[in-house]
Image (tube, rainbow, N blue to C red):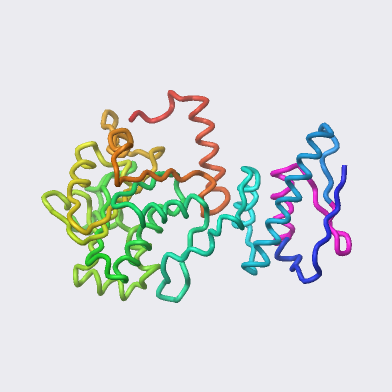
Amino acid sequence: MDRKIKINEDIDRVELFGNLDVNLDLIKEATGVSVFQRNDELILKADENTEPEQQEEALELAEKIIAELIMVLESENTLGKQKASYVISLCKEGLSYRDSNISRDVICFTHRGKPLKPKTLGQKEYVKAIRENDIVFGIGPAGTGKTYIAVAMAINAFKNKEVQKIILARPAVEAGERLGFLPGDLQEKVDPYLRPLYDALYDVLGRDAALRLREKEIIEVVPLAYMRGRTLDNSFIILDEAQNTTKEQMKMFLTRMGFGSKVVVTGDITQIDLPKGKKSGLVEAQRVLENVSGISFCQLKDTDVVRHELVRRIINAYDRYYKKYPEETQEE
């Protein structure tokens, strides 16, 4: 079963099809439909080994995907593999990238003048939640931009004079290695654990500007243990890798919040590095604070992964494995 689509001459075929036709391969992987070019037409050919009804559905989906890709290309002038893959995943869920207006929401600009925008619907909802709530939990797998977006929102709030200080915290929990074997004093020992926060800061602000703000103590990057006993007013406070907090640490952190402050807690409950017998403060917080007014929980998914395509596949593979062998899952 075949179908033909006519496309305008001014559409950049190389950009639409992707390098070495990678976008066409993505369409075939998602729908089973092969796409060929003939003059100014695209020929869509369904898998003849499937039922006629399935072929028709596959062709409908493939045609919708191509229409979406063309609209994205026309409005944004570029269409990389990552974006094409996300557009396809939305189409499979019956959603539209164009209608979601994802790319129109600018969080802030980097020191190089590059606009930072949400790249997925999940990220867009995450940004919206941070703007509208005083405490937000961003929970999801690696590569979904939880930390990076939180840091960008903090910097934007500081630039807009909504807060006077940015505080970034992380629990110094080992993932197999031991802190004591690292060289240097305490600060030098914990710095490797805080590196992802530094990286996000430097990327948005620039290294020199970030270091100047740190010297003035406008930006603090600290281990979670340093938070005890403090009351933080007019601050944007981020707790990263919160799945590695204990119940006591999470309660301690959340009660540091003062007037005029905003808190973002990020974590991935599938990557808990706490010793056996220790329950995650993030897991408990989901249960305890679920219905508290002013607190929002944003669940980012594998479709929100903005790293290499293999990251999403790795996450899905682990999810399937742990569903099949639940006894292998790390205890809470």
Q: Relative to 124, does residue 242 appear above or below in the rendering?
A: above
Depth check: 292 or 59 in front? Answer: 292
Q: Quadrant of residue 243?
A: top left
Q: Relative to 207, does residue 281 appear above or below in the rendering?
A: above
Task: Say whether residue 44 is left or right of residue 173.
Answer: right
Q: Quadrant of residue 155?
A: bottom left
Question: What percent of the width, then of the height, locates residue 312?
Answer: 54, 46
Depth check: 329 or 26 in front? Answer: 26
Depth check: 228 or 124 in front? Answer: 124
- Say which residue appears at 64% left-offset and 44% top-offset: 94
Q: Quadrant of the N terminus?
A: top right
Question: What percent of the width, then of the height, locates residue 193?
Answer: 30, 53
Which residue is the extreme one toward the front?
Answer: 293
- Say which residue appears at 14% left-offset and 54% top-offset: 231
Q: Which residues are magenta?
A: 17-43
Depth check: 125 or 204 in front? Answer: 125
Q: Relative to 258, does residue 267 appear above or below in the rendering?
A: above
Task: Say whether residue 229 is left or right of residue 219.
Answer: left
